[in-house]
Amino acid sequence: MKYRKMIALGAVASILSSMLSGCGQAEQKRIIRIGHNQSTNHPTHIGLTAFKDYINEQLGDQYVVEVYPSELLGSQTEMVQLTQTGAIDFCVASNAILETFSKNYEIFNLPYLFASTEAYHHVMDDEALTDAIFSSTLQAGFEAVTWLDAGTRNFYTVGKPIESPEDLKGLKIRVQQSPTNIEMMRLLGGSATPMGFGEVYTALQSNIIDGAENNEMALTDNGHGDVCKYYSYDMHQMVPDIVIGNVAFMEGLSEEEKAIFEEGFDILSETQRTEWTTAVAAAKERAANEQNVQFIYPDQAPFVEACAPLHESVLAKNPAIKATYDAIQEYNAQYPSVAE
Ligand code: GCU
């Protein structure tokens, strides 16, 4: 943590000095600030760097894009708030936390919503399904401009492997700050401990929590595999990351600029998705070989069964998402689980 803080302080110092020294030549240029909570090795940072290079190349006479990784601009929730007010222009937010800004996002937080990765990708790429959700926060000052893959979320623990929901009983498991996730943990029998991503490592290390849930990258990139030695593929969620932009900034762009930004968002999502598969495979190998993490493949059926009531209760409380839910079932039928 000390090391990470030193890096963060170093980065802030260099941001400040570049802001000061840049005043001369970049005086006329509008700085576009983008924040995210991953490391610079992460596919999301690589995608955002490709976006930055493209915009700087196409519109470099007017704009300078700057990407701030590793929660340098705050936690995800704080970054969403900064994007709302226009203090920064874009950030990457997990769909999980966006449900507290708009109930429309609840749909993609449901456990076992997608039958396969193919179904998940097709749904998220279907603008007829996502457009209304992505623009549902215009009034709140931000809109979604594209989505990014964040893989499949699974449980990982310090002391004992999770083979069935029974094993979660009595365990404090960190979840993202979303009511759907808290309810999911309740149904699975564990005790939900919501907190921001950046706090998880210390919480694991100091036994404040017994485990967490995330994709494989969290083991290596965030060091969680140094503490948690059991990673169980219950595959409870595929929660996308959403790139959001400040509405006033987006609306202030000319038609020509808008088209270039749209192309930039496509470059971002394509680069991130290509990098994702390789990054997850590499993370898994490193976790197994260097961190001695044991990968467990439990029977998923009891997990699916325990979570099933959540679909009904969320749809009953939020009937507006039912049409999207039904459309997702059609994709699920078309791209079923390979295990079926
Ligand atoms: C993933 C996801 C992040 C999210 C994190 C979390 O890493 O990509 O957007 O913040 O999980 O669990 O909080």
Image (spheres, helix red, strand yellow):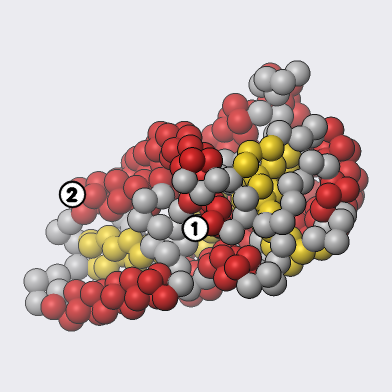
Q: Is residue 108 left or right of residue 79?
A: right
Q: For the residues carrying marks 1 and 2, which lies nearer the camera in this image?
A: 1
Q: Is residue 168 left or right of residue 131?
A: right
Q: Position of residue 210 (x, y in %)?
A: 72, 62
- Is residue 279 at least partly visible in the picture? yes
Vertical comparison of 334 with 153: above or below: above
Front position in the image: 177 or 284: 284
Q: CA distance from mark 1 to mark 2?
A: 32 Å
**Label 2 residue SS:** helix
Name the residue type under label 1.
Asn
Q: Is ligand 1 within 8 Å of the beta carbon of the residue shown at mark 1?
A: yes
Residue at the image position 9 percent from the left and 71 percent from the top = 25
Please name the residue that numbered disc 2 is placed on. Answer: 57
**Which quadrant of the figure has residue 67?**
bottom left
**Which quadrant of the figure has residue 98?**
bottom right
Q: Position of residue 253 (x, y in %)?
A: 33, 58
Vertical comparison of 216 with 336: above or below: below
Checking the image for residue 222, the label placed there is: 1
**Label 1 residue SS:** loop
Residue at the image position 42 percent from the left and 34 percent from the top = 278
Name the residue type under label 2.
Glu
Q: Position of residue 202 (x, y in %)?
A: 57, 70
Residue at the image position 44 percent from the left and 38 percent from the top = 282
Residue at the image position 59 percent from the left and 59 percent from the top = 227
Q: Is ligand 1 within 8 Å of the beta carbon of the residue shown at mark 2?
A: no
- Is residue 265 at least partly visible in the picture? no
Front position in the image: 161 or 26: 161
Residue ranking furthest to the left:
25
Front position in the image: 171 or 318: 171
Front position in the image: 121 or 221: 221
